[in-house]
Image: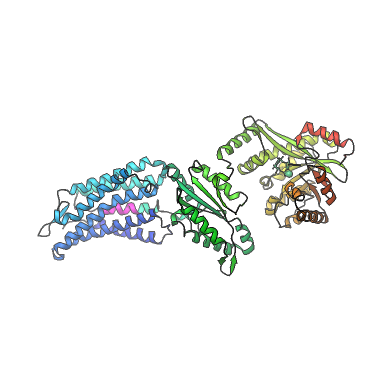
Amino acid sequence: MGYIIHYDICALVIYAITGVVFYFKKRIPCNKNKVFGILVGDSALSTVLDILSVFSTGEWGIGLKIFFHTAYYFTHNLIPFLFVIYILFLTDGYKEMSALFKSFLYTPMIVDLLLVITTPVTHFIIYVDSQGGYHRGTLQPFTYIVAIYYLIFGIVYAMGNRSMLSRQVVTSITAFISMTVVAVIVQMINKLLLVECFAASVCMLLIMFTLQSQDDMIDQGTKMLNWSSFVNRCSIKYASASDFTLLLIRIPDFKMFMKTFGGRFSNSLLRSFSDYLYNFVNLGDGFYLEDECFALMFPKDSEKVGETYRAIRKKLSENWNIGTVDTLITACFMRIDCPDDVDNADMLVDFIEQFKHREPETERLLHATDINFYDSKRRSEVENAIDKALDNRGFEVYYQPIYSSSRNKIVSCEALVRLKDEKLGFIPPQEFIPIAEENGKILKIGKYVFEEACRFIKKGVGTSLGIEYVQVNLSVVQCMQSDLVEQLLSIMDRYKVDPSSICLEVTETAAVYTPHIMEKNIKTLSDYGVKFALDDYGTGYSNMTYLLSLPFRFIKLEKEIVWECFKSEKAHIAIESTVAMIKKLNMQIVAEGIEDKHQLDTLLGMGCDFIQGYYFSKPVPEKDFIEVLKKNNTQAVTV
Ligand code: C2E
Ligand code: CA
């Protein structure tokens, strides 16, 4: 016999480890994983058959020997082919194959396998003589040619689609190919040294721990593919120019469920919802994109998108049962045809972020074109404009007067930042402030506005015309800085500004979450004499503990809330009682957005202490603001 089978035995051990780990690992049963499973199974079987071929002697019967050898060739020759199929699934290239590509892919394998199957009769590949002697047939080198063909095919395909493969994948492909080539050469030189199966087993193990490592691809709560695998998948799709359609589903009430029923219930709800979604797509096409948002991926223009939407909608019209609780779930849906609606993967990510955070619209299936998409190009232009303005002192601070009903004059003003860019023109604060908050530039902007306000106070013109304090907006990001107090105190000190001439406005959204550091900052500054106003009151939070625990002196009614008052009697009653309640708590009310006399009279009639709005003046540059003050405050304001 003389064959050295130790390597085959080692290969079997390695396959056993690979098989066990692969079987017990959490996996998404997508095609890629199925092919990997088949690849490992086939390679392990070929190793067993290799050993059996070696051991099958004359006593086993010639028929059996022929069978083992033929079966070994069959399974062994399949390995490079299956590996190419695996690479195709990795790059999503399997679905988009042309007929020509398919013929290049399948023909050599079909011919090879036909030759192997018929070899007991034709003796083309191998044959066993009547004494049980094993011989290679005339066409046996063809099987090597086919193997080399697939290895080259794999290299060429992988290199051609390099952009879609991570470095890990390229490394694994290179390792697989080089190990196989080395093993084939070794075995060709020394026919008795059976190392091919061993090389293949090591490669499978390598793939197992690199390409197949998926723990970080699955969202643990929903067991769906997570956000990063979604982004990865879409990038591959865009790079391979393969069209697809997404159905996004978001459960806007989820946070409410979380608060009302607790985390356990909410997680079960997410889980049962994701299980339900798998009725419509394969496991590899369902994603959980965080923030209670799911995505289902379909081939482009698939009728299934509409059907799925209608089915989920119907299902949601019934109660959803979680344990002992029955509840109704509402959802927002959006369809995105890629790449028609969104040009590239980066834009898609921005797009989905916007879908996640926009006002929920639950009545219909939104199409991507329904959203006024704020693209990443505009965003980076705005980011550049912010940077430029910070470098060249391009921001400006405008002032808007605040009228006091008890003193019948303008006693304060709000400092509002303005950004005008050479290229983009005027950029509204609603647009650039959130961007600056996200990238941290708000800290510099906030500092600049605060310094400007101090400089204005120090000049004394405003004060001489009746301004007692200036209101400055404080972003939530600023509120959470551990050195906020020192920073603001040192600026006030530099400009010799008394803390009581500053009122900082903190939004209700920020106050609701009140992280510890923010509470500390507010309380310390307040102890130094800085006033605080709760900005945008009424934007939808019912929890009022922060109203009582933080030292707010003023509550600013958001302009949309004020305007509601004139749209419905009920809103009018609600606002009137809110004003009364706040006054009882010994806080003063500022009504924003007052544009005409009727609004002014109504809000004053309700008992508001201060009024801010276009009725008195829009926010204007400092020079114009002084004129507004001169006009209004040198004589009693006529309201
Ligand atoms: P806000 O703090 O609620 O500021 C009031 C906004 O309402 C200002 O918009 C003001 O121009 C507008 N407004 C006041 N009265 C009326 C009115 O009668 N009618 C109408 N239609 N609008 C009125 P602006 O200046 O565009 O600022 C928008 C938001 O940007 C501000 O809302 C604030 O959240 C933010 N912002 C502005 N400046 C700063 C700043 O220096 N720092 C920070 N962190 N945020 C700022
Ligand atoms: Ca404000």
604 relative position to 116: left or right = right
Quarter location, residue 293 = bottom right
Q: Position of residue 383 (x, y in %)?
A: 60, 37
Question: Looking at the figure, which quarter contains the C terminus?
Answer: top right
Image quadrant assignment for residue 451: top right
- Residue furthest to the left: 130
Q: Which residues are magenta?
A: 192-204
- 627 displayed left or right of 101: right
Magenta-colored segment: predominant secondary structure: helix
Residue 541 falls left or right of residue 54: right
The percent position of residue 423, horizontal first and vertical second, equals: 62, 30
Q: Where does residue 93 sit, x and y in percent of width and height? A: 38, 46
Closer to the camera, 125 or 591? 591
Q: Quadrant of the N terminus?
A: bottom left
Residue 281 in view of the camera: yes
Please check the rendered image and state whether residue 200 is part of the magenta-colored stretch, yes or no.
yes
Q: Tell me where residue 501 appears, x and y as whole percent.
A: 81, 41
Q: How is the image coloured?
A: rainbow
Q: Is residue 327 highlighted in magenta?
A: no
Where ligand 1 lies, by image quadrant?
top right
**Taking 372 as reference, is 392 above or below it?**
above
How many numbered circles are shown?
0
Along the line of sight, the residue nearer the viewer: 555 or 244? 244
Taking the view exactly as shown, the residue that stands out farthest to the bottom is 324
Residue 468 is at least partly visible in this image = no
